[in-house]
Amino acid sequence: MDQDIKKNILSISTDTLNGKYHIKNDFARSILNYPAMMVPSVQEPIIEYLSMALNNNVSLLDPFVGASNTLVTGMKYGMNVCGQDINPLSILISQVKTSYYSIEELIDAQKRLIDTIKNDNLNSIEIDFFNIDKWFTKNSQVELSKIYRAVNKEASLKIRKFFWVVIAETIRLTSNDRTSTFKMHIRSIEEINQRFVSPIKTFIKVSHNSIESLTKYIHVINENGYLQKGKYSKNIDIIWGDTNLGINTKKTFNLLVTSPPYGDNHTTVTYGQFSYLPLQWIPSEDIDNNITIDYLRTIQEIDSKSLGGKSKINTKEIEEQIFCKSNTLKDFISQFKNEEREKTKKVSRFVYDLDKSIDNILLKMRKNSFLVWTIGNRNVNKKIVRNDLILNELFKFKKIDLFTDLEREIMSKRMPRRNNFSSMMNKEKILIYKKTQ
Ligand SMILES: C[S@@+](CC[C@H](N)C(=O)[O-])C[C@H]1O[C@@H](n2cnc3c(N)ncnc32)[C@H](O)[C@@H]1O
């Protein structure tokens, strides 16, 4: 049986794995350009084969859910789905992508909003935060405030959530922050002065595309027979939480599909910084009342709470605990001389947090469950951190062997090729484990 599953998985073509057949808008993927999103068409055959192996009775967990691309792929196959993430923007986008919306309710709401925005003659600005004038021109602040007032007026929370996501993408496209990097990086004064952006026009265009994209995806779920009385027929849980501390549900799962960060957020992908400006314009009570971090306190707040971020434990203690679990990590860190060691501390801290997260995850995984991890290696000071080998060793220490693995080129994933600390690799591994006890 296991041999057949492996054979099926290994038969997935290189083109599929490399995202050749990927369609940008599929699975409502484009409604918010969240960083480092998985490509659903790459995961889909793996999810499909493992679903068959689990007799099509699957409860799927993604403990680093990001923009929920794993969950929406699972929903196409009628799975119970659960996603957790520390970033409130991830929670909002995930709530929207896993909800049922009819095209009529969205189009009616869009018309209402456009009318309200056009009839709003106020010039007052609804939001204030440190350096707002640096990140938004006055005109953008006025236009975004009109959109904000209109969305806030909507009676339905579900509708407001959808249009908060539209605002998030509008802000990404119209603020003075560059779109070419996830770190907050201001455009030059000349560029800002020459650039004409209208948040209202962008909002209308983005809402149009998002309605089309989301309703197309919902149509697929309906065609597959998983909608009943305007609701997804299985369970959906979207949970705000720190996976390093635990998975905040009593439920258990037989499939995990995830792509964790590749390292600490500050030096790899700054999910928190990416979310900082949009989150200023979205009322926290409309996202989730269980969020306990003060995520708008500083630009770095979310990133420093994420895997590999600030830690109360000192590096020596961390390394003592983690080196015995991964020789690859130990050998990697040993290559560096004292003055270079500062940069490698973040690598040890990340692996230490990842290891704790795996322990929390395993508590929720049933006997004979499968765990699919997509992870890439990275460079630190021109030396490769072999995250793939490290992950294998962490699992081996927990007496879980690799079931099978695949490799893919990252062509269709939104990643920075290079940043000022480390460059990202252009290949990643899909490592599949089976928890047999
Ligand atoms: C590579 S992204 C996931 C992308 C996702 N697979 C998708 O397709 O959109 C990694 C996610 O891990 C989240 N993350 C980082 N540290 C976390 C933690 N301690 N607990 C929960 N989520 C965390 C980040 O916020 C980010 O959304």
Image (cartoon, grey):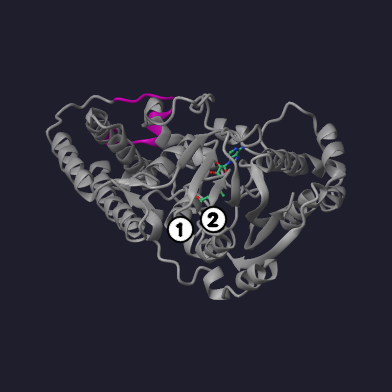
Residue type at numbered disc 2: Met
* Quarter of the N terminus within the rendering: bottom right
Q: Label 2 near label 1: C-beta < 8 Å?
A: no
- Quarter-of-image position of residue 93: top left
Report which residue position mark 2 lands on: 415
Q: Is mark 1 within 8 Å of ligand 1?
A: no
Q: CA distance from mark 1 to mark 2?
A: 28 Å
Side of 44 relative to 335 (left or right): left
- Residue 431 located left or right of residue 225: right
Amino acid type of the residue tagged 1 in the rendering: Tyr
Question: Which residue is label 1 attached to?
Answer: 77
**Residue 389 image point, x, y percent:** 77, 57
Identity of the residue drawn at 69% across and 70% down: 3
The image quadrant of residue 135 is top left
Along the viewing direction, whichever of 219 and 52 lies nearer the viewer? 52
Tell me if I can see residue 394 in this picture. Answer: yes
View quadrant of ligand 1:
top right
Report if residue 83 lies within the magenta region: no
Q: Secondary structure at mark 2?
A: loop
Q: Give the answer, above or below, for where 90 lies relative to 78.
A: above
Q: Is residue 419 left or right of residue 289?
A: right
Residue nearest the observer in this picture, 89 or 139: 89
**Beta carbon of the mark 2 residue lies under 8 A of ligand 1:** no
Secondary structure beneath dot 1 equals loop
Q: Which residues are magenta?
A: 126-140
Q: Is residue 414 above or below residue 311?
A: below
Q: How many marks?
A: 2
Please state if 34 lies on the left or on the right of 122 as rendered.
right
Which label lies toward us, 1 or 2? 1
- Tell me if residue 378 can be seen: no
- At label 2, counting other C-alpha atoms closer than 10 Å, the crowd grade (few under 14, some 14-19, many 20 or more) is some
Of the residues under marks 1 and 2, which one precedes in the sequence?
Answer: 1
